[in-house]
Image (tube, grey):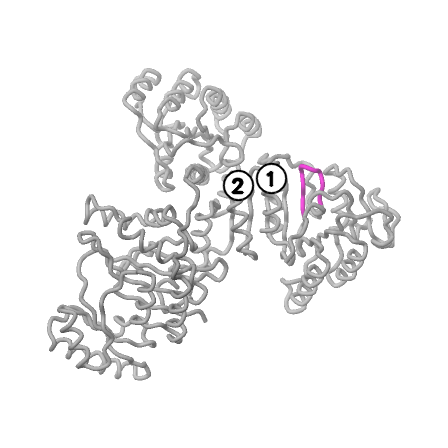
Amino acid sequence: MTKRDLRPLYSPRSVAVVGASAAGGRATGAIRNLQELGFTGKIFAINPKYDNVLGAPCYPSLKAVPEPIDLVCIGIPSEHIQAVLDEAAECKIPAAVIFASGYGEAGETGRARQKELQDFAARSGMAISGPNCLGVLNFQDRACGYSSTSPSSVETGGVAVVSQSGSVVVAMVRSLRGIGFSHIVSSGNEAVITSADHLEYLVEDPRVTVLAAFLEGIKDPVKFLKVADRAFELGKPLIVLKSGRSAGGSAASAAHTGTLAGSYQVQSAVFRQHGVIQAQDFDEWVELIEMFRGARPPSGPGIGIIGISGGENGVVMDVAEDVGLDVRPLSETGKTDLAKILPWFARPENPIDPTGGAANPDIFLGAVGVLAAEPQLDVIVISQDSPAAYDLTVAKYAVEAAKRTGKCLVYVNNFSGPWNPEILKMLRDAGVPYLQGLREGLLAIRAFIDYHARRKEPPKTHRAPPATQRQRDAQARAIIAAGGALVTEDEAKKLLALYDLPVPREVAATSKAEAVAAADTLGYPVVAKLISPDLPHKAAVGGVRLGLKSAAEVAAAYDEMTAGIARSHPQAKITGVLVQPMVTGGIEIILGVKRDPQFGPTVLFGLGGIFVEALRQVSMRLAPFDEREARSMIAEIPAFGRIFEKLYPGKNPETLVLPLLLKLSELAVEIGGDIEDIDINPVILDPASDRATIVDALIVPAS
C-alpha cells in the first residue's frame, strides 16, 4: 500500500465533526476537546438540525462547508459512516477519525463493514484512524480529533503514546503523574492506519523523545521492526506493553521448538533484538516511561544505593538481585571516606544506611558524594518511602546531589504511590526520575542500563550469503518437499549438512543385514534408531538402542525394535533403521528453527537432552543475526555457562556454539519460509576435542 501522509491527521488546519449536537455525545466531545486544547484552526460542526454547536458554525453536510477541510471526525453510528466517507472523498478531505464501534470486533456484519472501509481507503488514499477508537491528541500543536476525557490538564512534553486500547488512553490523560506528553493516540481496530504507522510518523518528530505503546496485536510486523530499528538509531526508546502473554506457546508439536518457541517467547526475543524495551504490566510500563523520559545516561552497570534503614535496604537488595542489578561493594578508599561521615555505629558499605542521616544534610550529601566518587558505580539510587517524614528533605538533597555530580541519580519510592506533587516537580526540574514501587522502579533502572549499554555496541553486521546459495536452496527445498508431513532424521541431517552443520557418519539400513554391515563399517559401539515419519519421538516408543557393541547386538536390536513397533504402532510406516557411531560425554544442547507467523524464522538455543523440558531455558533471535546477537543468546542461558565452566574450566563455549548459531541463521533466512520447525536435539559438544555433533534432528515442513 502507498504510504499515507499523516500530517492532516496530526496537525490539521481545519476540522469538521460529523454528528455534533446540543445533546452531547462523542462528536460534541471532539469539538469541546479542540476548544479546550487551544486549537487555533477552523472548527466546523456537521448536523442539519443546528446552526452552531458549542459556538462552532454548523452545516448540514460536508459539501456545504465553504472552506477546505483537513480532518473529519465522525461521531455517528457505524451503519451511516460509509456515506459520510464517500462525501469526504468527494470533498478531497485527506484524513478521518472514526469513533464508532460495530466493525471488525462485531461479528460477521462488522467484519464485512470493516472490509468495506479498507477497500474504500485503498481506493481513496484517505488516512483513516480507527474505527472503534478515541482518536488522536497532539499536545505540541494543540490539535486533536479526540472524543473522550478532556485533555486540557495534560502537561506537554516529549512522550508519545500509541494504544490500541481506549481505556489505557483515558487513564494516561487522567493521570496526575505529570508525565509530559507530545501525543496520545487511541488506534482502535487499526483497519487502515496501524500502530506501526502511527509510530513511524511519531519517531521522526524532533519533539518526541520517548515512544510508548500498548499493543494487543501487531498488524504490520515488518514495519513495526523497521520503526523499532529507526527509534533505536535515533536514541528514542520504544517502550511496549503487549497483552496476551499467558496465551503464548504452542499446545502440541512434533518438535520441541514448537513448544518452547511460543508466540510470546518469540515476541520477547525479537523485541530485545531490535532494542524495544518491554514492560510486563501497567505499573512497570509507567515507571519505564518516567525513567527514560529524563534520566541521565549511565556510563556502566554499577549500582550505588543509599536507603532509609537497614531493614528496608535488605529488601532493596533482595529485589535488586531478583532483577539483575549489579550492586557493587565500595572500594577501601570509599569505605574509609564513608566511615568519616556516618555515625560511629553505622556500617560503611553499599547500600548505605544513613542511620537517621536524612535529617542531616552533611551526612546524607556526604554519603551520596562518596557513592558518586566511586568509579565502579554508575547509577546512584536514592531509596526512600514517599510520602514519609523525610521524603521532601531527601528530595531536596537529591536535587543538590544532582548539581554536584554528572552521574545518573534516581529517586525510588519503595511503596507504589501516592506521589508527592511538590517532590515530582522538584526532581523533574533537576533531571532526577521519581519512580514509584520498589520492584517496578528497579526493573526500570535495569532496562535503562541495558538499553544504553546496547547503544554503545558496534552496529550490526551480517555475513554475505555464500556463492553456492542458489544451488543449496534448491537441494534443501527438494528434501523438504519429499519429506511429506515430517522429514525424518536421516533426511533432515542431509539438509543440515548442506549448511556445514556437523552431522555424524551414518547409514540408513533397510534390512538387518545392512544394519550389521553398516555397524561393522562405522565401528563399534553404535546407535540404532527406527526411521519413521509417523514416530517423531523414537525413544519414547522404544525405537532407539544405544551402545551396541557387536554385530549380534545390532541384529537383536533391529529385530526387537521393528517387532515392538509393529505391535504397539501397527499403522506406523517404518522405512528403515539408522545406524551411527555412539557419541559419549560432552554437554548436550538443543538448536532449532521456528517459523513465527508474525515475524518469520527464528533460531533457538538452549540446554538439550533431559534439560529441554525440565528447565525450559532457551534463547531466540529473529534471523538473520550477527555474532553479537549469537553471543547474547549464549549469555541468556546462565545454566549452560555454569555447567560448561564446571566441566571444562578455561574453555570458551562460544568456540563451539557460535558457528552453529550463525550457520542456522543462514539456513533460517534461506528456507525459513518452507518449514514450521527444525528440531536439532541433542547436539553434543565435546570441548576436549573442539567438536560438536548433531545426534538427532527432524524437520516439520510448513503446512
At mark 2, the secondary structure is helix
Using residue 489 as the reference point, say whether residue 202 is left or right of it. Answer: right
- In this view of the protein, which residue sits in the foreground, 238 or 660? 660
Residue 469 seen from this side? yes
Q: Residue at x 76, y 42 (%)?
A: 13
Using residue 634 as the reference point, say whether residue 169 is left or right of it. Answer: right
**Residue 521 lies in magenta, yes or no?**
no
Residue 648 image offset from top left, x and y in percent: 19, 48
Residue 548 image offset from top left, x and y in percent: 14, 71
Q: Residue at x 31, y 53 (%)?
A: 659
Residue 595 image offset from top left, x and y in percent: 44, 62
Number of residues whose C-alpha sits closer than 10 Å to that of mark 2, classed few (under 14), some (14–19) or many (20 or more)? many
At mark 1, the secondary structure is loop
**Disc 2 versus disc 1: distance between alpha carbons?**
11 Å
Residue 24 image offset from top left, x and y in percent: 78, 49
Q: Residue furthest right?
A: 51
Q: Residue at x 45, y 28 (%)?
A: 409
Which residue lies under the disc numbered 1?
A: 175
Number of residues whose C-alpha sits closer than 10 Å to that of mark 1, classed few (under 14), some (14–19) or many (20 or more)? few
N-terminal of the pair, mark 2 or mark 1, is 1
Disc count in the image? Answer: 2
- In this view of the protein, which residue sits in the foreground, 692 or 35? 692
Q: Indicate the quadrant containing the C terminus: top left, top right, bottom left or bottom right.
A: bottom left
Q: Indicate the quadrant containing the N terminus: top left, top right, bottom left or bottom right.
A: bottom right
Task: Kindly check if marks 2 and 1 are in contact, taking CB atoms under 8 A apart as contact.
Answer: yes
Q: Residue 114: which quarter of the image?
A: bottom right
Which residue lies under the disc numbered 2?
A: 286
* In the rendered image, the vertical position of residue 364 relative to residue 494, given as above or below: above
* In the rendered image, the vertical position of residue 685 relative to residue 552, given as above or below: above
Where does the magenta region start and end?
136-144
